[in-house]
Amino acid sequence: MNWHNFFNDLEKWMQASNTMLQREGLSSDKYWQWMIGTLNVIEQRYNHNPLVVKLLATIVDYQEKQYNKLPKEDRQ
């Protein structure tokens, strides 16, 4: 497992995620589809390594918590 490559990919993903959040917003279906799809690509790239899966799942969990903090009228 090349952890250097994984964390570089994760850093690039986080930069892209920030861009998508600015463009689409946390409550948009487009962002969530993008997020799940791109995290799935990373998971596959690293052969579903159990630690990679847990780290990526933590990202999804964090985003869900941020979404739940939004006022109900801002959620789609």
Image (tube, helix red, strand yellow):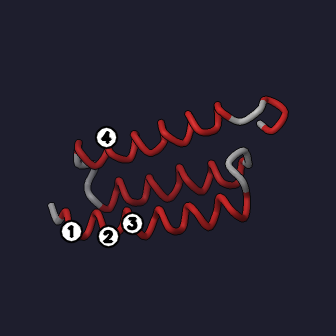
Residue 46 shown left or right of residue 9 in the figure? left
- Please report the residue visible at 28 percent of the width from the left and 63 percent of the height from the top: 6
Residue at horizontal 49 percent and vertical 39 percent from the top: 62
Label 2 near label 3: C-beta < 8 Å? yes
Quadrant of the drawing holding the C terminus: top right
Helix, strand or loop status at disc 4: helix
Mark 2 to mark 1 CA distance (whole Å):
6 Å
Percent coordinates x, y for residue 60 in the rendering:
48, 42
| Mark 3–mark 4 distance (CA, rounded to whole Å) | 16 Å
Q: Which residue is mark 2?
A: 8
Residue, disc 4: 54
Comes first in the chain, label 3 or label 1? 1
As measured in the structure, the alpha-carbon distance from the residue carrying label 3 to the one carrying label 2 is 5 Å
Name the amino acid type tagged 2: Asn
- Tag 3's secondary structure? helix
Sequence-wise, the earlier of marks 1 and 4 is 1
Q: Mark 2 and 1 residues: CB-CB less than 8 Å, in contact?
A: yes
Q: Nearer the viewer, residue 10 or 41?
A: 10
**In the rendering, which numbered label is found on residue 39?**
none
Q: Is residue 25 above or below residue 20?
A: above
From the image, tell me which residue sits under label 1: 4
Q: Sequence order check: which comes first, mark 2 or mark 4?
A: 2
Residue under pointer 3: 11
Q: What's the amino acid at mark 1?
A: His
How many C-alpha atoms fall within 10 Å of the one at disc 2: few (<14), some, or many (≥20)?
A: few
Left or right: residue 11 versus residue 5 is: right
Where does residue 39 sit, x and y in percent of width and height? 45, 54
Residue 45 versus residue 61 in the image, above or below: below
Spatial CA span between label 1 and label 4: 17 Å
